[in-house]
Amino acid sequence: MVNTSIFVEMGKMSKDGYFIFHPIGKDFQYLNDAFSSIWEIPISEVKAEPSILWMQIHPEDKEHVKDCYFECLTDNQAKKYEFRLSINGLEKYVRVSIFPIDNGGELLLCGMMEDTTVMRHNKIHIEQINARKNITLEVLAHDLQEPFGMMQMTASHMANELKGGKYDGMMDAVDFIHDLCDRNLRLVRSMINREFLKSAEVEIGKERADLVNELRDMLRFYRRSQLSDTKTFHFSTSHEKIFIHLDTMKFLQVINNLISNALKFTPEPNGFIGLHTEELDNSVIISVRDNGIGIPKHLQPGLFDRLPQTLRQGIKGEPTGGFGMGIIKAIVELHKGRVWFESEEGKGSTFYIELPK
């Protein structure tokens, strides 16, 4: 016969759950107080009706627990399992170490149960931090290359104009470069402040803003650039003022990404890029439309998932880091919104963003 006295004494002192289960009799020969605390059921009730534990197991994990139990009975080896409990609507993670013991010809399952909920939540917390860090780095890597390319293009145009003795429009070009630098310096400062890395939940700094005014100002920025020579930028709105709570810096970066992508895939001349806002009862829809080359059907399903096969160069061979659409989706979802698109090859694309009011 197995002497369980040492095991019982350990159970009295431990914060983990200790148990001895008799499979043939389907009853518990020993349970410590910690076991009762983990399951949140009195020991007397568990001993009187062991099946009551089944009700506390998370519905999605019940088949897993059943398989683990039969594996213990047949393998006759020490096992370690993890599963979830569902108690009063809250999830609890547990890890169980089970040791099959031969007790004079009868099998006993002796084991220890650890509540790993805090550990699992900490792991999720770390994964969230890493995800936000990656988004931050991707924003910088992707969104800075576009402005630098636009500044290089503008500077090259200025140089050619100066060589030809033409000075008209120079101040507009200088103002364009100045504004571009200012916007992206503020973006870098925002990233340095680590807004994405401050809490267990991703937080954004929302403020009440006039969406129409912000978008008009952004499109004015493009109209003042040399891009207006070969592209038409159009803005329309259902209401002259639409107030909404959002993180202005991050959301304008979303619109900037969509316009930048439209520029890449819209031919010159006669390129058209339209920005529209539509106020609904409980939400606002912002759309960015172009008359570019469109998105091939086989690339559309994975467009927001950063899949390698969805990456393609712009019309003029502009490189892509492949992060833009993923960033757009991430920031829109942080605003509790959704993003989708419609596209037809040879006719253009329209991207829609819906944000709650």
Image (tube, rainbow, N blue to C red):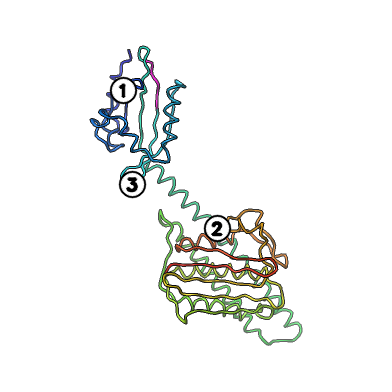
- Pointer 3 local density, CA inside 10 Å: few below 14, some 14–19, many at least 20: few
Q: Is 99 a magenta residue?
A: yes
The type of residue carrying mark 2 is Leu
Q: Which residues are magenta?
A: 98-102
- Pointer 1 local density, CA inside 10 Å: few below 14, some 14–19, many at least 20: some
Question: Quick one: 319 or 45, which is closer to the camera?
Answer: 45
**Picture residue at 33% right of the left edge, 15% below the top:** 2
Residue, disc 1: 7
- Pointer 2 local density, CA inside 10 Å: few below 14, some 14–19, many at least 20: few
Describe the element under mark 2 as helix, strand or loop: helix
Label number found at residue 193: none
**Picture residue at 58% right of the left edge, 74% below the top:** 180
Residue, disc 3: 89
The type of residue carrying mark 3 is Gly
Residue, disc 2: 137
Residue 264, quarter of the rendered image: bottom right
- Quadrant (top left, top right, bottom left, bottom right) of the C terminus: bottom left
> Disc 3 or 2, which lies upstream in sequence?
3
> Disc 1 or 3, which lies upstream in sequence?
1
Callout 1 touching callout 3 (CB < 8 Å): no
- Measured as percent of width and height from the top left, residue 215 is found at 52, 76
Q: Is residue 297 left or right of residue 25?
A: right
Describe the element under mark 3 as helix, strand or loop: loop
**Picture residue at 47% right of the left edge, 82% below the top:** 240
Residue 335, above or below 158: above
- Observer-side mark, 1 or 3, equals 3
- Observer-side mark, 3 or 2, equals 3
